[in-house]
Amino acid sequence: MPISGIEQPQIIDIDGNLRLRKYSDDCAFALAWYQDEETLLLVDGAISPYTEERMYRMYHYLRERGEVYFIEHRAPGDTSYTPIGDVTFWQNDMPIVIGEKSLRGQGIGKKVINALIQRAKDLGFTYLKVAEIYNYNIASQKLFESCGFKVVQKTDKGHSFELLL
């Protein structure tokens, strides 16, 4: 169980075209996200592409700490959802990746973060933190600030953020 004493839902519906689906080892589709240099710079601060093994290790590391979800999107007129990114939810960090670059800047990240803020409230959490957002990742900084997070500490490469619930 990723968060002690709390069962992770299989699906969190966000709206008619967006949902979170619990991580499964069936994730080879995500490898392309972690081989893209622009995405890697935003996520890791480096451009060293992931191998499939490294990607699985990352997901398993995150699953040990919190709830890992694939962000799934359904385009208008489609009947099925397509994975477009991932997010991990735990009280002390909330890394999010919109892997499909064409869908960045469309408000998806904000909907995902707000859904997880509501989950945190429902679980009785009193705060949420983001461990670090790099100084140059302005889009992520603005995303979390638009959801109510505040800068609380300078880090080596950026800042950490916190939201009091």
Image (cartoon, rainbow, N blue to C red):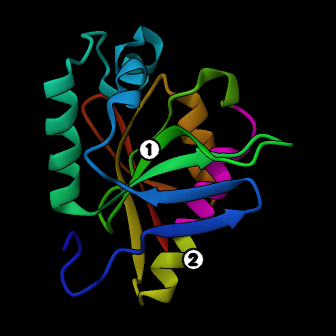
Q: Is residue 160 left or right of residue 73?
A: left
Tell me the element at label 2.
helix
Upstream in sequence: badge 1 or badge 2: 1
Mark 1 → mark 2, Cα distance in angstroms? 18 Å
Front-most of 77 and 105? 77
Tell me the element at label 1.
strand
The image quarter containing residue 64 is bottom left
Horizontal and vertical percent position of residue 154: 33, 42
Horizontal and vertical percent position of residue 125: 39, 83
Front-most of 148 and 78? 78
Instruction: Reply above or below: 19 against 154.
Output: below
Tag of residue 118 = 2
Q: Is residue 93 left or right of residue 149?
A: left
Give the prevailing secondary structure in the magenta stretch.
helix
Q: In the rendered structure, which segment of residues is drawn in magenta?
A: 105-116
Residue drawn at the location 38% of the way across and 41% of the way down: 159
Asked if residue 146 shows in the view, the reply is no
Instruction: Reply above or below: 112 against 120.
Output: above
Horizontal and vertical percent position of residue 58: 19, 38
Q: Which residue is mark 1?
A: 86
Tag of residue 137 = none
Mark 2 crowd level (few <14, some 14–19, many ≥20, 10 Å Cα): some
Q: Which residue type does callout 2 highlight?
A: Gln
Q: Which residue type does callout 1 highlight?
A: Asp
Q: Which residue is most to the right?
A: 77
Residue drawn at the location 41% of the way across and 29% of the way down: 29
Q: Is residue 148 left or right of residue 153?
A: right
